[in-house]
Image (cartoon, rainbow, N blue to C red):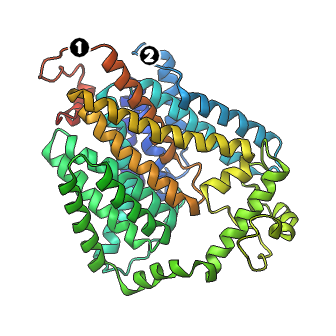
Amino acid sequence: MRDLAFAMVWVVLFPVALWSAHIGVLLWIWVALVSPNERLYGFMAGVPFNKIAAGLTVLVLFLNREKKKFYVDATVVLIILLALVGTASEYFAIIPSDDGSDLYQKLIKEFVLAALIMGLMWSRHRIHMTVIALCVAIGFTSVIEGLEYAVSGGGHKIIGTGGIGDNNSIALAALLIVPPLYYLSRYSALRQMRVAFMTALVISLVCVVGTFSRGGFIGLLVLFAFFVINSRNKLPAISLAVVAAVAMYFLASDDWFSRIDTIKDASDNGSFMGRVIAWKVSTLIAIDSPIFGGGFHAVQRYPVWSRYITSIDSVMSFIKTPAADDYAHAAHSIYFEVLGDLGILGLALFMLVLAVTVFNCGAIARIAKKHPDLAWAGDLARMLQISIIVYMVSGAALSMAYFEGFWILVALVSRLKKTVHETVAVPISLPATKAPVPSPVHAYARLMPDRV
């Protein structure tokens, strides 16, 4: 039944995506983050939805004569350089592997998707729809898991999904969409949609608590702090943060508090020290291969792991670690993951992507202050900046450097800045009424943001 229902949805979405490449981008975002294959068990389980959505979007891009606004900025240059370094890293990998090649191909597809977002989602309406696609896709998991946790009185255990990752990854993914959901709850045209997005925000916070993730808890603290700092109206922001904190206090179980309490004993925690050992191994790989690293998932290759664990005391000696396990670990950090995979050069490019994206958010907000008609862009930039900062903090202990949601956020910020600059450069006095809907296919245009 589930496969049949999804097949019917797909039959509707497929021809709609043929109408315009930008609709294909929205479909691609949704499919990439929902990962429908792991939720289907019948005749639809083997359908390569991601490849179909990607291929369809690229095909329509070349066949359709709709307006395209591709450009080059610092983010585009950094992504191209990262793609080149990733390609070289894959070619010169210490130990080539199928899953390493799969990860490389995934990253290249993410970069293509990012480029399409930048070139096709050039209007306020399309940017708004991209934010919706991102939040609905990740929210599909966070809302379901959050509801199950709440309904079960804390008994439901959130273990993760193949598309996003384990419970820690789900916590970070849910945190990433909380600020954009807040933006949608303010700027969506329909009151019902604003209520729905605010509800999804609350349930996503419940999901973060239900993951029992210590990194997620730290991310929550960062989220609340920067939400207050970045909000134009401090009092409502502080009130919302306090209400959320009180609600989570009563919702969280004793086991959750016991789990979070272990943060202060990190040096005695075997899980944390295992991460530190993986960080040291990643560092040693990068020292030996500073330009292209060891290849994707290098630290997870046992021959590579066994080669370097005997020398882990030679780096980061200020952190004493116990004897390393006789099996390979994941990097457990976006920074050390990139360092081991792509080398020092790759990490430098990755850090520049983060810095440029955070800076661009601030630049957008500053421009929007001078132009009241761009208030929506300033508010969105502030929310996206919070998401990126949360990713930088919580991602320090998670292997999520190649997470689709992050690269979509990077592309969104770049596209938003370009749109703002274009709007300021060509000041046009527009009537207060909405533009007419050009086609029945644009029925979804009722979601057009109109609250400024």
Q: In the image shown, does 205 or 31 lie closer to the viewer?
A: 205
Whether residue 236 appears in this view of the structure is yes
Q: Residue 428 carries which label?
A: 1
Q: How crowded is mark 2: few (under 14 residues within 10 Å), some or many (20 or more)?
A: few
Alpha carbon of mark 1 to alpha carbon of mark 2: how far? Answer: 27 Å
Q: In the image shown, does 413 or 69 lie closer to the viewer?
A: 413
At a point 53% along the width and 22% down the height, the residue shown is: 72
Amino acid type, mark 2: Asn
Q: In this view, does 215 lie above or below 24?
A: below
Q: Residue 15: percent from the left, percent from the top?
A: 38, 29
Whether residue 41 appears in this view of the structure is no
Where, by quadrant of the figure, is residue 117 drawn? top left
At a point 35% along the width and 83% down the height, the residue shown is: 253
* Left or right for 452, reference 390: left
Q: Is residue 166 above or below residue 190?
A: below
At a point 59% along the width and 48% down the height, the residue shown is: 402
* Left or right for 11, reference 32: left
Decide which of tag 1 and tag 2 comes sooner along the chain. Answer: 2
Q: Residue 148: percent from the left, percent from the top?
A: 34, 71
Q: Residues within 10 Å of mark 1 (few under 14, many from 20)?
A: few
Circle 2 — which element? Answer: loop
Q: Which quadrant of the figure contains the N terminus?
A: bottom left
The residue that mark 2 highlights is 64
* Left or right for 411, reference 421: right
Where, by quadrant of the figure, is residue 126 drawn? top left
Q: In this view, does 355 lie above or below 21?
A: below
Camera-side mark, 1 or 2 = 1
Q: Are marks 1 and 2 in contact (CB under 8 Å)?
A: no
Q: Is residue 414 above or below residue 34?
A: above
